[in-house]
Image (tube, grey):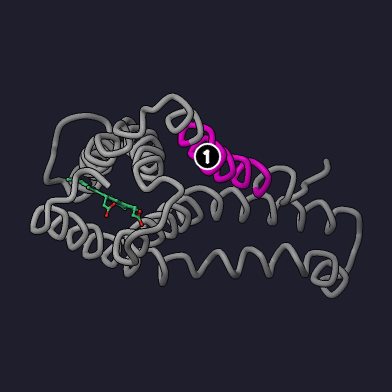
């Protein structure tokens, strides 16, 4: 069997990420074309709300919430966080007025990407890498030859293993910068540009 790390695991991840960014651009374009820019403001609030409720998964994992299946909470966490991020990106739009707001948006993107790497890509990629190693061993290759053949794949997996060092701190940075941005908006109410 052919176990290609890129085709099986990394490509769907790249597709998932590019669809988030491309959809943002498409929605932003449509809103601007149809004089519906005001929707951007409200999509920021709705997106933030969706991201906040997506964290019910963490409460379920820590057993603060005791009802419901953790699997269902995880699925909800993924869909809500993806949709919420899309709405927040649409909210950011393609304009640049404030560094703080963009720092929050960037931290959000890195948090979403590193979370996805940690939760799914890493596990799938490790399975694919192990399956590939098994195939090569069955073909009679020595350990050294196997290591050479899987060099790039195992480097990719090793890099992904560092996701935890990124995910938690950047999620905290995201929380702080987003709060500061929201606080800033309420202090100096600038709903219209
Ligand atoms: C996850 C949370 C959020 C992120 C990452 C975020 C990010 C952004 C970004 C990137 C911009 C564009 C700034 C620019 O044009 O340079 C922006 C603008 C704005 N945001 Fe947010 N936002 C979030 C939540 C909110 C919420 C909940 C509100 C309202 C309560 C809000 C109100 C606004 C307003 C009024 C502007 C326009 C400010 C201006 O043009 O100077 N945002 N935000």
Q: Position of residue 93 (x, y in %)?
A: 41, 45
Q: Is residue 18 left or right of residue 140?
A: left
- Label 1 CB, ligand 1: below 8 Å? no
Total tally of numbered discs in the picture: 1
Nearer to the camera, 168 or 142: 168
Q: Work out whether residue 56 can be spotted.
A: no
Q: Residues within 10 Å of mark 1 (few under 14, many from 20)?
A: some
Q: Which residues are magenta?
A: 10-28
Q: Most extreme residue toward the right, as rendered?
A: 140
Name the residue rendered at 77%, 53% in the picture.
132
Based on the displayed image, in which of its 4 quarters is residue 38 positioned?
Answer: top left
Nearer to the camera, 96 or 148: 96
Q: Main secondary structure of the magenta part?
A: helix
Q: Most extreme residue toward the bottom, as rendered?
A: 144
Identify the image quadrant of the N terminus.
Answer: top right
Q: Position of residue 159 (x, y in %)?
A: 59, 69
Q: Is residue 185 left or right of residue 140?
A: left
For label 1, the SS is helix
Q: Position of residue 139 (x, y in %)?
A: 91, 54
Name the residue rendered at 23%, 43% in the picture.
192
Which residue has dot 1 on it? 25
Nearer to the camera, 19 or 101: 101
Name the residue rendered at 90%, 64% in the picture.
141
Q: Most extreme residue toward the left, as rendered?
A: 187
Name the residue rendered at 34%, 59% in the picture.
97
Q: Work out whether residue 179 can be spotted.
A: yes
Q: Is residue 170 magenta?
A: no
Q: Is residue 14 magenta?
A: yes
Q: Is residue 171 placed above or below 70 in the rendered structure?
A: below
Q: Position of residue 158 (x, y in %)?
A: 60, 69
């Amino acid at each position: 069997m052919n176990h290609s790390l890129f085709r099986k695991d990394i490509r769907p991840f790249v597709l998932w990420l590019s669809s988030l960014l491309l959809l943002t651009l498409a929605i932003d374009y449509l809103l601007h074309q149809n004089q519906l820019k005001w929707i951007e403001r409200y999509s920021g609030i709705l997106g933030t709300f969706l991201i906040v409720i997506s964290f019910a998964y963490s409460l379920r994992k820590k057993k603060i919430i005791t009802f419901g299946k953790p699997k269902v909470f995880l699925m909800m966490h993924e869909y809500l966080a993806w949709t919420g991020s899309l709405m927040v990106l649409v909210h950011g739009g393609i304009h640049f007025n404030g560094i703080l707001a963009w720092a929050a948006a960037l931290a959000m993107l890195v948090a979403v990407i590193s979370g996805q790497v940690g939760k799914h890509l890493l596990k799938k990629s490790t399975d694919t890498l192990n399956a590939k190693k098994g195939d090569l061993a069955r073909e009679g290759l020595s350990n050294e030859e196997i290591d050479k053949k899987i060099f790039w794949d195992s480097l990719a997996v090793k890099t992904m293993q560092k996701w935890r060092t990124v995910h938690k701190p950047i999620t905290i940075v995201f929380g702080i910068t987003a709060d500061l941005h929201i606080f800033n908006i309420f202090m100096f109410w600038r709903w219209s540009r």
